[in-house]
Image: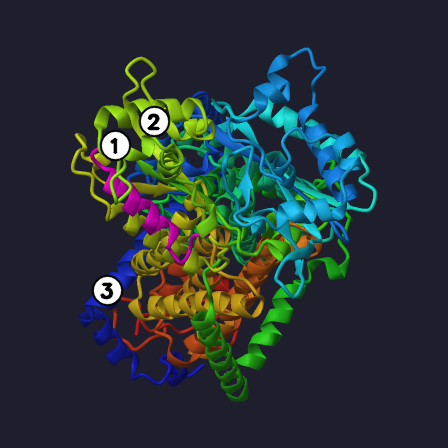
């Protein structure tokens, strides 16, 4: 090999040596790399010498950390997971729960047929009502009886237009009788004594030439059940034992009941929760099968196909190592008081994917060490030392970049994502520690077993004349990747790779510009579930009906604030995102009640304002006990003094599907409510009205999830670059690694658009995880390129592909295997996992194994300087160096300390050859 080739065309060895000494960055690079490689070499020697003690210490440490689980706290409440705790939503929610603690469970039923405005249609509605009223009526627990479960708000259905309706009355009615009542204008409910909108009860309406209703195909019935929740501290969930039990029985009965001539669809809170859990639970088998595939793949790929060198038990140790690291992380985080949420259930997969990647890197490096032919026989601890010299630095680079990326994610305002990132960061740190100690210790034991010629399965000694099959020693994946590397590192290959990368990036960039932020809870429901069928029909026949909400007024002088109450009602009623007919104002109905009384209406001014304070409060009390009884649940007052602490107007948004428009609607209605200022309020909070609805938690989260994702990825990218710069210790290589990571994330997000995905809470979490995988795929190749000391850039890039490429590829394949079976899942969450991780693995591997080596072969920097290991290799090198030095020019007896230029000579033959085995190399200072 001539000097020009070795210097890669950058000058003479003497010039390079001078540059090395004068270049501060290069000196820093060599200092950091020397320190890391020397430190891991010594650490590997320590573990390799004392494997039993290492295993004992790691197990004791794990047991100590598990004690932290006594403080384990699980949290499932959405408001504690997906909303910033200092946000307006949390403040409003706390006030609402203090003043209106009894919430509502909605039971909605659709009766669908050719025509529901017939005596038979009315009879079927009556049958539904009878079924609801009689549900669990014979149960010994009276708390389950409907009269005790029913909320104060009357049932909303067409049958309320006929008070006291029964089957006998219906039999005597004709279709014309029904149409006459339905077409009354105004249509007033005798049950609730107020105007109602027929569009809220009927759909599929047909009208005649005079615009009178003659037919309707769908009738809607709504029942209101008390929602008496208590916090289950073991799961962190709100639970309503009686409400859940009642709705479970209701689902069973309504499915068993026939309604001749009609289809019935229903929706309850329990049916929604059950459908979502069933969607995931039914496919857990696919996920666990994926884990089994990973374990099987690792067992086959870690070793070789021979009785002596297969590593099935070592693969099992690797899986145990991941389990130990996960358990330790759980104990440490729980002990520190970090909450555990539902999204944390994917942590085992994340840790398995990253942990297996570390195992492959260590084993690949071990195989590379074992393949080198040494003149002096090395002991197992010395081989472990040389293994950790390179593998230790490699897993340090990827592990610490992953850790820092997750620690940046832990600064988010979303508690669920913050907690997940803390658990993930600690988990990866534990994986790193246990891979370098626990797994390497067992690798040492397995190596000693192999050295003693013992069977890898049952450990009995093999016959002295036993020989493995010739094919068992072949490294097929290394050979395949080496051939592949030679193809892409040709000039045509490089051109094709660069053009392909640019094309992929262009399409990815276009996709990311088109990517929308959207989320729909219906995505989580199986298509054949009762809940999904109801929602599908509801959106078809009642498209204008959306999220329920309410506007709240606090402790004010309601008599003095009557103008503001009028103004508030008008602002809500005329808002473009609110259904006008859905706004239910107790004050408006109270004024109407006074108008209808000849004596009481004399107390009203021309502006419909009560003129006397005593009259106002006395009649309001009478109204709530009489005609306005349905509004009593909209008041919070002191039973003794009748002092009003708060009131509300109930209403509903129009059906808004787009996330952006939902956020705009929430902000707009909030702004209108806060614009109404109450001078009489004695507290700061009650100075203005405010709007609150349970659906706002999702809208509030969607508002910040996109911003948080962008922020976290940018900050994590900066952090990854800085950590990679320190560990790889070369600015130019780190920039190229960061570019590959950036290209990967851009393409992952961009191609999500082509796969009909959008940004939501699940995908935001997965994208944070994907950053770690993208760093792994590119970081290993970047470090391997810098660690390859021999040859041109092309040679070093090829070395990186063939030597560490198999570990990177195996890590990617094992990650993909975990989710490949989810391609056939019916669950939106699992389908999303499959799609995004397919993109993560395929795009990440392309940039790590294809684009980065090509980039490095074109503009990559020089390699690290060679460092010495505390093994017999050092003695061998010195011996060869002295021998070679004696053959140099006489008089040049001064030893050179800075070994920059390297010649490769055989100790035995004293001439240049192409053998690159470490044991045959003689490092001669130029």
Q: Name the residue beneath numbered marker 3.
A: 27
Q: Secondary structure at mark 2?
A: helix
User: For mark 3, does the 10 Å Cα neighbourhood hold few (<14), some (14 to 19), or many (20 or more) residues?
Assistant: some
Mark drawn on residue 104: none
Q: Position of residue 53 (x, y in %)?
A: 48, 29
Characterize the local packing of mark 1: few (<14), some (14-19) or many (20 or more) Cα atoms within 10 angstroms.
many
* Above/below status of 382 relative to 441: below
Residue 517 vs residue 611, the one in the foreground: 611
Q: Position of residue 309 (x, y in %)?
A: 68, 49
What's drawn in magenta, residue-wise? 557-579
Mark 2 vs 3, N-terminal side: 3
Q: Are marks 1 and 2 in contact (CB under 8 Å)?
A: yes
State yes or no: discs 2 and 3 in contact (Cβ < 8 Å): no
**Disc nearer the start of the sequence (3/1):** 3
User: Which residue occupies 63% across, 31% down?
Assistant: 163
Residue 763's x, y, as percent? 49, 55
Mark number displayed over residue 558? 1
Q: Whole-Å distance between the Cαs marked 3 and 1? A: 77 Å
Vertical relation: 761 (above or below) 886 = above
Label 2: how many residues lie within 10 Å, few (<14), some (14-19) or many (20+)? some
- Picture quadrant of residue 20: bottom left
Q: Is residue 440 magenta?
A: no
Q: Of circles 2 and 3, which is in front? A: 2
């Amino acid at each position: 090999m001539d000097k020009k080739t070795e210097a890669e065309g950058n000058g003479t060895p003497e010039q390079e040596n001078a540059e090395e000494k004068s270049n501060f960055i290069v000196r820093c690079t060599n200092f950091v790399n020397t320190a890391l490689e020397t430190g891991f070499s010594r650490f590997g020697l320590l573990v390799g010498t004392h494997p039993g003690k290492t295993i004992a210490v790691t197990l004791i440490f794990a047991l100590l950390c598990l004690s932290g689980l006594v403080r384990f706290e699980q949290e499932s409440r959405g408001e504690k997971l997906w909303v910033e705790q200092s946000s307006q939503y949390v403040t409003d929610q706390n006030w609402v729960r203090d003043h209106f603690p009894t919430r509502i469970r909605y039971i909605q039923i659709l009766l669908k047929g050719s025509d529901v405005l017939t005596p038979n249609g009315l009879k079927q509605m009556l049958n539904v009502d009878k079924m609801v009223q009689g549900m669990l009526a014979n149960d010994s627990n009276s708390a389950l009886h409907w009269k005790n479960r029913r909320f104060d708000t009357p049932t909303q259905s067409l049958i309320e237009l006929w008070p006291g309706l029964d089957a006998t009355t219906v039999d005597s009615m004709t279709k014309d009788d029904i149409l006459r009542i339905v077409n009354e204008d105004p249509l007033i409910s005798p049950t609730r004594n107020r105007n109602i909108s027929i569009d809220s009860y009927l759909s599929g309406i047909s009208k005649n030439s005079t615009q009178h209703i003659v037919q309707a195909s769908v009738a809607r019935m709504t029942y209101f059940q008390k929602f008496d929740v208590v916090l289950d501290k073991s799961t962190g969930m709100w639970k309503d034992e009686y409400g859940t039990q009642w709705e479970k029985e209701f689902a069973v009965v309504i499915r068993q009941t026939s309604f001749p001539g009609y289809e019935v669809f229903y929706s309850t809170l329990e049916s929604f929760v059950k459908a979502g859990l069933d969607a995931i639970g039914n496919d857990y088998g696919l996920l666990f099968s994926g884990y089994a595939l990973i374990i099987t793949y690792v067992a086959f790929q870690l070793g070789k196909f021979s009785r002596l060198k297969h590593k099935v038990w070592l693969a099992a140790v690797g899986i145990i190592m991941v389990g130990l690291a996960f358990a330790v992380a759980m104990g440490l985080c729980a002990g520190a008081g970090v909450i555990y949420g539902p999204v944390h259930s994917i942590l085992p997969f994340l840790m398995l994917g990253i942990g297996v990647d570390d195992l492959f890197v260590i084993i690949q490096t071990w195989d590379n060490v074992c393949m080198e032919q040494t003149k002096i026989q090395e002991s197992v601890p010395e081989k472990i030392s040389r293994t950790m010299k390179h593998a230790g630095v490699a897993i340090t680079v990827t592990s610490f970049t992953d850790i820092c990326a997750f620690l940046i994610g832990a600064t988010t305002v979303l508690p669920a994502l913050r907690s997940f990132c803390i658990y993930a960061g600690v988990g990866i740190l534990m994986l790193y520690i246990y891979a370098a100690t626990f797994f390497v210790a067992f690798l040492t034991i397995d190596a000693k077993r192999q050295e003693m010629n013992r069977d890898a399965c049952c450990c009995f000694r093999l016959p002295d004349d036993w020989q493995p099959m010739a094919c068992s020693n072949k490294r097929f994946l290394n050979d395949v990747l080496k051939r592949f590397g030679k193809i892409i590192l040709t000039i045509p290959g490089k051109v094709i790779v660069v053009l392909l990368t640019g094309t992929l990036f262009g399409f990815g960039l276009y996709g990311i510009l088109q990517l929308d932020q959207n989320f729909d809870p219906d995505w989580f429901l199986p298509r054949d579930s009762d809940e999904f069928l109801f929602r599908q029909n509801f959106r078809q026949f009642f498209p204008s009906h959306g999220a329920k909400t309410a506007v709240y007024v606090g402790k004010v002088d309601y008599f003095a604030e009557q103008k503001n109450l009028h103004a508030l009602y008008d602002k809500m009623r005329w808002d473009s995102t609110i259904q006008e007919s859905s706004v239910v104002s107790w004050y408006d109905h109270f004024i109407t009640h006074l108008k209808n009384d000849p004596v009481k209406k004399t107390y009203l001014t021309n502006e419909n304002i009560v003129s006397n304070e005593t009259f106002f409060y006395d009649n309001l009390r009478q109204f709530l006990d009489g005609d306005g009884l349905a509004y009593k649940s909209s008041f919070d007052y002191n039973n003794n003094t009748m002092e009003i602490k708060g009131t509300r107007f109930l209403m509903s948004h129009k059906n808004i599907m787009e996330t952006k428009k939902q956020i705009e609607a929430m902000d707009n209605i909030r702004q209108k409510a806060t614009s109404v200022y109450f001078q009489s309020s004695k507290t700061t909070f009650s100075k203005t009205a405010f709007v609150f609805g349970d659906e706002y938690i999702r809208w509030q989260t969607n508002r910040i999830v996109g911003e948080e994702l962008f922020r976290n990825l940018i900050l994590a990218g900066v952090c990854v670059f800085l950590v990679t710069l320190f560990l790889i210790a070369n600015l130019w290589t780190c920039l190229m690694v960061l570019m590959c990571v950036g290209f990967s994330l851009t393409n992952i997000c961009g191609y999500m658009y082509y796969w009909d995905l959008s940004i939501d809470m699940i995908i935001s979490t997965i994208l944070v995880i994907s950053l770690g995988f993208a760093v792994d795929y590119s970081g290993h190749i970047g470090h391997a390129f810098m660690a390859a000391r021999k040859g041109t850039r092309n040679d070093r890039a090829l070395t990186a592909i063939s030597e560490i490429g198999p570990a990177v590829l195996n890590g990617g394949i094992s990650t993909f295997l975990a989710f490949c079976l989810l391609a056939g899942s019916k669950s939106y969450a699992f389908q999303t996992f499959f799609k995004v991780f397919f993109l993560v693995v395929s795009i990440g591997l392309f940039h790590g194994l294809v684009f980065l080596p090509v980039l490095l072969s074109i503009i990559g920097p020089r390699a690290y300087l060679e460092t010495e290991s505390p093994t017999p290799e050092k003695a061998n090198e010195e011996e060869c160096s002295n021998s070679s030095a004696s053959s140099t020019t006489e008089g040049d007896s001064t030893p050179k300390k800075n070994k920059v230029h390297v010649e490769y000579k055989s100790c035995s033959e004293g001439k240049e050859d192409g053998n690159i085995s470490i044991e045959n190399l003689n490092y001669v200072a130029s």
